[in-house]
């Protein structure tokens, strides 16, 4: 059993190292306004975070992660560029697995910098790799930007692309949409019947509720438009599927994706960025030849990573969550920044898991 | 000690439970006045009747304060995470049928499936600046169902009663509620989603896996199980 005081001591040590790397210490309140988190993650967050209320401030959540409050603090009064570190408890509601802790320490490092995204990505990855050096971990990286570029460049309507982008972090719904937009699954009966009608629909049903008849009519129009659009072409679809399945070491993965880019040329700029990042990581001494790249990595985690993503896993302990993980979240700063935005990348470490692995390794 | 059986204290559910046990040669009766929550058991020795609100029965089973309890599948699954580990279903009792369903206004002719709902929710959020509200008291079941289906941009608002009225009152855009016939839905101008069945529920006799069973309690349980078996 790892002592809590040992975990805290390790967390403090890690934070000192991040400070030495140039980060400024930030602290955030344990209670976060629930509204921001709900807007961001939707109702799903309630299954993962503890919600409490009072009559004055309404719903509050026990901090489920640091990224959101750190971004908010930076957007309010941060200087540029900025590097932050923090250490503290996060809380995760557990409804399924009694063995997973509902409270644990995280130590993080976040970089807000405009100039050179590849350099910032490499800086964060190599700094985390250094902290976990010697532990029996497998590192994996990915890049949500490549998949997003592939979707945005599809030869189909903007509405379909927007629908796919909206569900890029929900692989099953994404799959269902792709199947529908490519005509692989039949149109549901109810939809067929609706599409056979014309003009304004004047049913006998009573209009009630805040969603108005005009909105219903607008969606019917949109569905009619969509029915006229041709399906996504087979070669694009196959290329997209091949892309999502890429799982190789970085050099081989890059090669495979350049081949796929023959059918999906829109991913070439994103692949150039991957090349630049790989070079920057190499320059920092990362063994990229043997580093795993997974194109679908990051699709099922918290939905804010939109570029580089990484994780360090205990291979012998598949039951454990990643010991370290992180990624780039440029869009999150836009969403929380009230018109402002800044490229940002960072990650978190789990000192408790590090100690656990060290003890069992002895 | 005695084997404790929890039964809903009110109305048809209690009467039907009494009938169900009577057919299996176990007589449950309410003792004292109508207002007094006490009962008696004949047919199985060392068994005790505890009258409780149906909503509290899952919790009492999970805490091991009662050994057996009669309540709906819906309430057990909503209130007990990993319910299979805490309780065992001994018998489906064939009454109290109710489905937990998703329903939207009838005039939403563009919404028939979860797929439609997801797209409508996205458009609704863009138009109104807040997520599409679903009134329910079954938060966990509905959330898990919608997460599984990949529906986004909705929010659950709590409604402990008269849920079908929330749409008209504009405190919610749609509902997730229990229905047995669908009549209340139709009366409130609502319709079912074709793939929106969250759960089929009926009154079920549950056994607590957590409660302690001493010699007398074990004997009483076996006597009861024999009687239930005999009937089948």
Image (cartoon, rainbow, N blue to C red):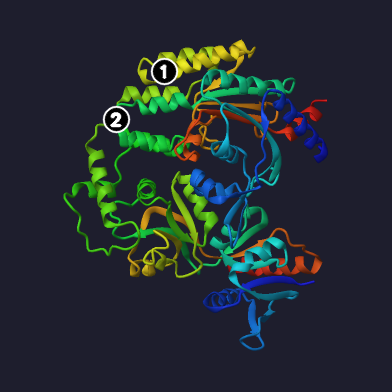
Residue A16 rendering spot, x and y as whole percentages: 75, 28
Q: Residue at x 67, y 81 (%)?
A: B39
Q: Nearer the viewer, mark 1 or mark 2?
A: 1
Q: Is residue A135 above or below residue B147?
A: above
Quadrant containing the C terminus of chain B is bottom right
Q: Residue at x 59, y 23 (%)?
A: A140
- Chain letter for mark 2, please: A
Where on the picture, by quarter, is residue A182?
Answer: top left
Secondary structure under the numbered disc 2 in the rendered image: loop
The residue indicated by pointer 1 is: A269
Q: Residue at x 37, y 38 (%)?
A: A163
Mark pair 1, 2: CA separation: 20 Å
Front in this rendered view, residue A246 or A323: A323
Say left or right for B223 vs B93: right
Q: Which mark is residue A156?
A: 2
Asked whether the residues under the numbered discs 1 and 2 touch, taking CB atoms below 8 Å apart as contact, a structural biologist would say no
């Amino acid at each position: 059993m790892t002592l809590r005081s040992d975990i805290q001591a390790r967390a403090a040590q890690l934070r000192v190292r991040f400070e030495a790397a140039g980060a400024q210490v930030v602290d955030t309140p344990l209670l976060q306004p629930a509204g921001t988190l709900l807007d961001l993650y939707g109702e799903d967050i309630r299954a993962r975070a503890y919600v409490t209320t009072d009559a004055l401030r309404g719903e509050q959540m026990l901090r489920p992660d640091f990224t959101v409050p750190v971004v908010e603090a930076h957007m309010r009064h941060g200087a540029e560029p900025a590097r932050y570190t923090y250490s503290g408890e996060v809380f995760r509601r557990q409804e399924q697995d009694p063995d997973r802790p509902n409270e644990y320490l995280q130590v993080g490092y976040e970089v807000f910098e405009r100039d050179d995204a590849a350099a910032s990505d490499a800086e964060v990855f190599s700094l985390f790799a250094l902290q976990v050096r010697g532990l029996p971990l497998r590192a994996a990286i990915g890049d949500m930007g490549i998949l997003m570029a592939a979707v945005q460049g599809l030869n189909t309507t903007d509405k379909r692309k927007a629908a796919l982008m909206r569900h890029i972090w929900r692989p099953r719904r994404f799959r269902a949409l792709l199947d529908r937009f490519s005509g692989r699954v039949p149109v549901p009966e109810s939809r067929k019947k609706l599409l056979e009608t014309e003009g304004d629909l004047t049913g006998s049903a009573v209009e009630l509720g805040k969603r108005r008849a005009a909105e219903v009519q607008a969606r019917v129009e949109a569905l009619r438009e969509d029915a006229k659009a041709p399906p996504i072409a087979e070669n694009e679809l196959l290329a997209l599927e091949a892309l999502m399945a890429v799982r190789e070491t970085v050099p081989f993965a890059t090669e495979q994706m350049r081949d796929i880019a023959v059918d999906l040329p829109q991913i070439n700029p994103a692949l150039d960025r991957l090349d630049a990042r790989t070079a920057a990581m190499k320059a920092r001494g990362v063994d990229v030849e043997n580093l795993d790249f997974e194109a679908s990595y990051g699709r099922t985690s918290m939905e804010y990573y939109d570029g580089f993503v990484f994780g360090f896993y205990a291979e012998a302990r598949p039951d454990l969550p990643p010991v370290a993980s992180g990624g780039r979240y440029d869009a999150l700063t836009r969403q929380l920044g009230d018109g402002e935005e800044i490229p940002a990348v960072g990650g978190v470490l789990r000192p408790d898991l590090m100690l656990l692995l060290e003890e069992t390794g002895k | 000690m005695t084997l404790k059986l929890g039964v809903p204290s009110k109305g048809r559910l209690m009467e039907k439970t009494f009938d169900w046990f009577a057919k299996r040669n176990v007589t449950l009766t309410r003792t004292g006045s109508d207002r007094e929550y006490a009962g008696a058991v004949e047919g199985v020795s060392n068994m005790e009747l505890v009258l409780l609100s149906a909503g509290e029965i899952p919790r009492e089973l999970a805490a091991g304060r009662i050994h057996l309890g009669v309540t709906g599948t819906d309430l057990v699954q909503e209130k007990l995470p990993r319910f299979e580990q805490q309780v065992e279903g001994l018998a489906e009792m064939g009454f109290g049928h109710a489905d937990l369903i998703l329903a939207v206004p009838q005039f939403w002719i563009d919404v028939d499936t979860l797929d439609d709902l997801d797209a409508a929710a996205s458009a609704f959020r863009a138009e109104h600046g807040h997520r599409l509200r679903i009134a329910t008291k079954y938060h966990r079941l509905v959330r898990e169902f919608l997460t599984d289906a990949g529906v986004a941009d909705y929010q659950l608002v709590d409604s402990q009663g008269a849920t079908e009225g929330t749409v008209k009152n504009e405190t919610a855009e749609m509902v997730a509620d229990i229905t047995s016939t669908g009549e209340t839905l139709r009366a409130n101008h609502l319709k079912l989603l074709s793939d929106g069945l969250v759960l089929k529920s009926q009154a079920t006799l549950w056994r607590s896996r957590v409660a302690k069973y001493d010699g007398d309690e074990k004997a009483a349980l076996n006597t009861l199980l024999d009687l239930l078996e005999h009937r089948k």
